[in-house]
Image (tube, grey):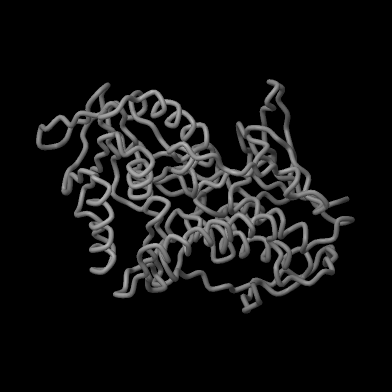
């Protein structure tokens, strides 16, 4: 019988893992099924562009995985039973089904984190999903000149959203609310450039401000101030997909699945978690942040570990580390903040038009990597060895 591998979620991490597994393992021995709610691959790192009115290139999954051996199942995951090793799904037409697996790769990612602030779900827009970005796009299209738009959240997503909207719609009054100082995790050079761009775009920044409520037409803050907001965009971080919490998997308080260095669940060895769904440790024994930069390496690690365990090979030990944080500040400006392995800013930073081009190449490279997840892998797929010794001794192998 073929070993059944199911990958849940075709974001950056899930799509890379599925393609890499199909390349690693022989089709006579293994089936790789990729389950995703939408028929297209969504470039999440570009959703602020979509919200600002730009059209993104469609990337149908059927075309991206044509000829790879990956089986696509367009359906929404409604449940996972890790004891029975089954996944329940709902098809777009309303039908339901159950899929059995031998190995599961959980890559359902994350969505908006409301931070338990009243009114966010009812009144704020999000750009953590394509439907959310489209809803914001439609709302902004009907917004008249001079109307206030408030972006809540001073992290990288908030910075990209605020600058993109201000550049695309200079007729709007765009504001940015952040709990700390503007760009407080950047180097001095990075902060100076960010301030220059933000001021040039006319963005009003509310620093050291905590939002305590969102209502129709306004944002309430901890000091009692009500900021006018015809549209509120919520970008205060991400929350893991809730399905993992409803399983017997060991998860953290954030809903992420606890994994070992090979991305395998510490409670259920036939389940692997990658991307935002996993609590994976990086340099300095610090958790990897939810990001595209973490998703790719965790997917490589999981796929190579699964292949090694099925074929009796050596486990990978790919160091997962950071090199830079890439921030688009509209279409003409950018900021590349260089960081330590554990993601702390250093003095060096690339700014301006060159940084914007760099960020664009990174975005294109990320999408290319999804469609070509096997760069450097041998063309010959390895056969599954029944009852092969599954050594857990980690050794370094090429990515």
The spot of residue 210 in percent (x, y) is: 19, 41
Give me the residue at 31% from left, 32% from top: 232
The spot of residue 123 in percent (x, y) is: 33, 25
Which residue is the extreme one toward the bottom?
Answer: 396
Give me the residue at 71% from left, 46% from top: 6
Q: Nearer the viewer, residue 311 or 147?
A: 147
What is the number of callouts on the image?
Answer: 0
> Which quadrant of the rendered structure holds the C terminus?
bottom right
Q: Quadrant of residue 376?
A: bottom right
Q: Left or right of 310: which side holds 267? A: left
Q: Is residue 397 above or below residue 140?
A: below
Give me the residue at 58% from left, 61% from top: 365
Q: Left or right of 230: which side holds 168? A: right
Q: Is residue 368 above or below residue 154?
A: below
The spot of residue 348 in percent (x, y) is: 33, 75
Q: Quadrant of residue 185?
A: bottom left
Q: Nearer the viewer, residue 366 or 2?
A: 366
Q: Left or right of 257: which side holds 101? A: right
The spot of residue 43 in percent (x, y) is: 55, 47
Q: Nearer the viewer, residue 166 or 136?
A: 166
């Amino acid at each position: 019988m073929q070993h059944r591998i199911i990958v849940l979620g075709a974001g950056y991490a899930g799509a890379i893992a599925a393609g890499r597994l199909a390349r690693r393992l022989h089709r006579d021995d293994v089936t790789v099924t990729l389950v995703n709610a939408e028929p297209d691959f969504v470039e999440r790192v570009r959703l602020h562009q979509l919200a600002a009115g730009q059209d993104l290139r469609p990337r149908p999954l059927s075309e991206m995985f044509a000829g790879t051996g990956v089986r696509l199942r367009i359906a929404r995951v409604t449940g996972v039973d890790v004891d029975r090793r089954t996944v329940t799904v709902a098809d777009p037409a309303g039908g339901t089904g159950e899929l059995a697996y031998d190995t599961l790769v959980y890559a359902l990612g994350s969505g908006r984190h409301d931070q338990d602030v009243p009114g966010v779900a009812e009144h704020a827009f999000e750009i953590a999903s394509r439907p959310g970005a489209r809803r914001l796009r439609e709302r902004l299209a009907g917004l008249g000149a001079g109307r206030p738009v408030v972006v809540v959240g001073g992290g990288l997503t908030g910075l990209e959203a605020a600058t993109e909207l201000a550049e695309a719609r200079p007729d709007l009054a765009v504001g940015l609310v952040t709990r700390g100082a503007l760009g407080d995790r950047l180097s001095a050079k990075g902060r100076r450039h960010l301030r220059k761009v933000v001021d040039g775009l006319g963005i009003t920044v509310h620093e050291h401000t905590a939002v305590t409520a969102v209502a129709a037409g306004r944002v309430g803050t901890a000091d009692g101030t009500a900021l006018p907001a015809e549209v509120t965009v919520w970008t205060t971080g991400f929350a893991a997909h809730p399905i993992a919490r409803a399983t017997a998997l060991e998860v953290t308080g954030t809903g992420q699945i606890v994994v070992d260095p090979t991305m395998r669940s510490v409670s259920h060895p036939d389940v692997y978690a990658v991307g935002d769904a996993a609590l994976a440790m990086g340099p300095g024994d610090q958790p990897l942040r939810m990001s595209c930069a973490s998703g790719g390496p965790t997917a490589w690690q999981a796929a190579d570990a699964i292949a090694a365990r099925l074929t009796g090979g050596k486990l990978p030990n790919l160091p997962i580390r950071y090199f830079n944080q890439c921030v688009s500040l509209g279409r003409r400006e950018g900021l590349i903040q260089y960081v330590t392995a554990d993601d702390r800013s250093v003095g060096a930073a690339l700014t301006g038009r060159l940084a914007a081009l760099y960020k664009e190449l990174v975005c294109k490279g990320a999408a290319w990597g999804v469609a070509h997840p096997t760069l450097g892998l041998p063309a010959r797929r390895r056969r599954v060895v029944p009852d092969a010794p599954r050594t857990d001794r980690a050794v370094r192998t090429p990515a």
